[in-house]
Image: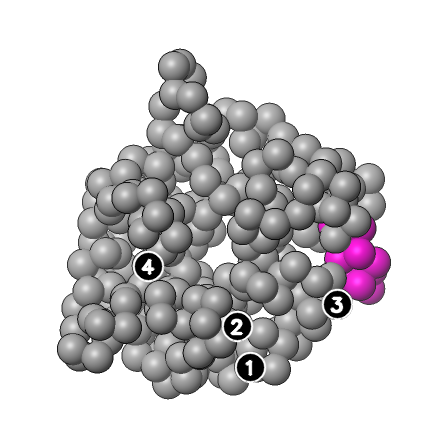
Amino acid sequence: MRNVMIAGNWKMNKNVNEASELASGLVDELQDGTGSVDVVVCPPTVDLKNVADVLKQSSAQIALGAQNVYWEESGAYTGETAPSMLTSVGATYCIIGHSERRGYFGETDEDINKKAQALLAHHIVPISCCGESLEVREAGKHVEFVVEQIKADTKGLKLTDPSQYVVAYEPIWAIGTGKTATAADAQEVCSAIRSTLKEIFGEELSSGIRILYGGSAKPENIKGFLKEPDVDGALVGGASLKADSFAAMVKAAK
């Protein structure tokens, strides 16, 4: 049985004070607990320590994640963050491969694979994103495209437990556009992802890996996605920037 995961990607939003306020608000909203739902928040790097402190002081059942990492341990890599630095602030998850990183910063599947390897070596769980553009979807090649991403991003990864790795399917055309894939659209691709993971990691391990949907996911539509057999939660963008709306998604998933 896979526990549902609701992960919030705050993207480049919230300064240090605002991030602390949002984390505190979320703690208050979820003071009755999260049930069997695993909750993760991924603030900007400069906010990680403050948010970690809020979560620690409250003993909240909320895990801390980062939005990016570099695969080297240390050195002359201006502007980058090493996995050990994320560990030092208490981050246990990290988003990699988001379409905004791929599109704006030219990140490749090879880069994402290196990041996954580095995170796993430091016992940080990658939330590895994949997804197609509108052009690819309209050409009817979306499943094939995402399957190839999964194969490239997981190349050479060694997993011993399904909790070590999370996949987030985010159709690019539905991110921040207000357009949303239907639950059936999400299931079609998530089912193909699950089949590909089985080829790579075997039946038993892959059956426990969580696959999230992302792309304008919000309180009003989350239940529909979670009814699908291969959708195990959501990677949430805009709706994670307000404590009440993000908490509503967690409560809907309980």
In the image, residue 125 lies at what x, y percent? 46, 44
Of helix, strand and loop, which one carries label 1? loop
Report the residue at 65% width, 59% height from top. 241
* Type of amino acid under label 2: Ala
Name the spot of residue 250 as percent of width and height, x first.
66, 68
Q: Are marks 2 and 1 in contact (CB under 8 Å)?
A: yes
Q: Earlier in the sequence, mark 1 or mark 3?
A: 1
| In contact (CB < 8 Å): disc 1 and disc 4 | no
Residue underneath mark 3 = 244
- Main SS type for the magenta part? helix
Label 2 Cα crowd, 10 Å radius (few <14 / some 14-19 / many 20+)? many
Q: Which of disc 2 and disc 4 is earlier in sequence?
A: 4
User: CA separation, marks 1 and 3?
Assistant: 15 Å
As displayed, is residue 32 above or below residue 12? below
Q: Amino acid at mark 3?
A: Asp
Marker disc for residue 221? 1
| Residue range highlighted in magenta | 23-32
| N-terminal label among 3 and 2 | 2
